[in-house]
Amino acid sequence: MYQPTDLKKGVVFQLDGQPYKVIEYNQKVVGRGGSIVSVKIKNLINGSLLPKTFKGQDKVEPAEVTLKKVQYLYSDGDSFHFMDPETFEQFDLTKDIIEDASGYLKEGEELSLQFFDGKVINVELPKNVFLKVVYTESVVKGDTTSSVLKDAELETGITVKVPSFIKENDVISVDTATGEYRERQK
């Protein structure tokens, strides 16, 4: 069983027999050490969003999900195609299941799919991914402080803020949970 404080962003749990994923998490501590956890959750079966509040002593049931390692093959616009590298079984997922993960998917990369009752409900990305910078503004000479951030478009089409010393064709690490730059690949 989970405590409400375990329901951080991205956690999958079960409520009334349905799997939910935490989209937003907020905790408020009240008197005598108690706390109230407010979450925005997404039903992974029908896609509906729901606000939910838990008190500190509530128990939350983990979802009975299984993980399967897959390889990302390609996207044809409406569907994303994955393959189990051992059985060669293929899975086609729609944009509503993929959501923001599409910006971190690179052809040939391995990741995990989450299953609930035999149905794919979620894409589990690695914590960090390495992506190539395809476009970024040039740095003004003399303005090389690392605290200055600029936009960089990556090979998957997403844009992230990067330090000014990053240039085109650099490969950078991006945190998939926050979408933030981590480091330049050495």
Image: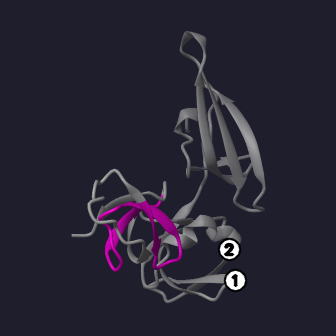
Q: How is the image coloured?
A: one colour
Q: Give coordinates of residue 115: x percent, y percent.
A: 60, 66
Q: Give coordinates of residue 8: x percent, y percent.
A: 54, 43
Identity, as a three-letter code, of the amino acid under mark 1: Asp
Indicate the secondary structure of the residue bearing disc 2: helix
Task: Examine the rendered structure and indicate whether residue 120 appears above or below residue 182.
Answer: below
Q: Which residues are magenta?
A: 150-176
Q: Are marks 1 and 2 in contact (CB under 8 Å)?
A: yes
Residue 130 drawn in magenta: no
The residue that label 1 is drawn on is 78
Q: Give coordinates of residue 94: x percent, y percent.
A: 68, 76
Task: Examine the rendered structure and indicate whether residue 139 appears above or below residue 77.
Answer: above
Task: Examine the rendered structure and indicate whether residue 139 appears above or below residue 40.
Answer: below
Identity, as a three-letter code, of the amino acid under mark 2: Lys
In this picture, residue 90 sits left or right of residue 129: right
Task: Examine the rendered structure and indicate whether residue 149 appears above or below residue 55.
Answer: below
In this picture, residue 47 sits left or right of residue 81: right
Q: Residue at x 45, y 74 (%)?
A: 154
In this picture, residue 46 sits left or right of residue 78: right
The residue that label 2 is drawn on is 95
- Is 175 or 148 nearer to us in this picture? 148
Q: Residue at x 42, y 73 (%)?
A: 136
Query: Badge 1: how crowded within 10 Å, few (<14), some, or many (20+)?
Result: few
